[in-house]
Image: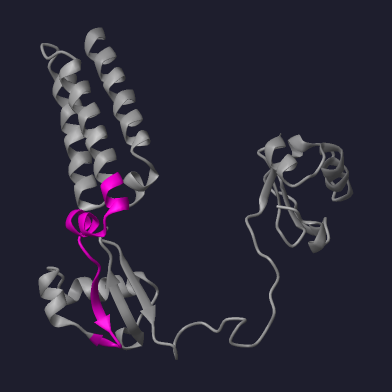
Amino acid sequence: MLTVLLRATVLFFFAVLVMRVMGKRQIGQLQPYELVIAIMIADLAATPMGDIGVPLLYGIMPMLMLMLLHSVLSLLSLKSQAVRALLNGKPSVLVRRGIIQRKELCRSCYDLNDLLEEIRASGVMNPAEVGTMILETSGKVSVFPKAAYRAVTPEDLKLQTGYEGIPLTLVLDGRLERQNLAAGGLEEKWLLQKLKALGFAAFEEVLLASLDTDGMLFVQGKGEKPKLVIARALAPKEVVW
């Protein structure tokens, strides 16, 4: 039994390592050939895991080969558009200028129920509001409403907007995020002073503290009735990240 558990542990971590080496896109956005590789890796790991008579190398070596094959195919896809089209296919336009493309639906094995479901999943209730709908090579669907139904943007209103970037998490569950503090050119003493001014005596009392690129500090304390504060900590021109 111990042997089986050890083999399962080794194969699990090796399979995770292979998937990590293959990149995050492999996990979040599978192309057809990547899906095949992922299924084969799972099968290769399962065989020696369940049969102790099969050497571990019989599962590990093929997985290494698949990892190498994935790297080669990914490199070829980056270098050649023809190879990319052969391996991944091409996006299919299911709705063009508000008109459902029936032939494209048939070619993609996509029925009207699937179409309506994806439209609703994208946040559009009325299919008449859809201007363009694209079936991506990964199987995901991109839905774009007609111009008359899309949300108004600051550009439409001729408004000028400032820089908007990723907020820095400064305190997470009572622990100071020193790396993020350094990225913002800030000091621990400065942050502690800001928190004390808002009613928090120490970092341990804070569940979450984040600073956005507009200089606004968001702080939520711990407890059943947590204190929630949003206050200005920096001028927008002092933001450096």
> Image height check: is 218 above or below 36?
below
> Is residue 150 shown left or right of residue 12?
right
Q: In which quarter of the image is residue 212?
A: bottom right
Can the viewer see residue 212?
A: yes
**Residue drawn where x is 86% and y is 43% of the image:** 190
Q: Residue 132 at what x, y percent from top left?
A: 32, 80
Residue found at the very far front of the displayed protein? 79
Residue 86 forms part of the magenta stretch:
yes
Residue 27 forms part of the magenta stretch:
no
> Is residue 85 shown left or right of residue 150?
left
**Residue drawn where x is 35% and y is 29% of the image:** 17
Q: Nearer the viewer, residue 74 or 144?
A: 74
> What segment carries the magenta color?
75-99
Image quadrant containing the N terminus: top left
Q: Residue 4 at what x, y percent from top left?
A: 22, 13
Can the viewer see residue 174?
A: no
> Image height check: is 45 above or below 82?
above
**Residue drawn where x is 18% and y is 26% of the image:** 62
Residue found at the very far bottom of the displayed protein? 148
Q: How many labels does the image show?
A: 0
Q: Residue 235 at what x, y percent from top left?
A: 83, 61
Q: Quadrant of residue 57?
A: top left
**Residue drawn where x is 39% and y is 87% of the image:** 146
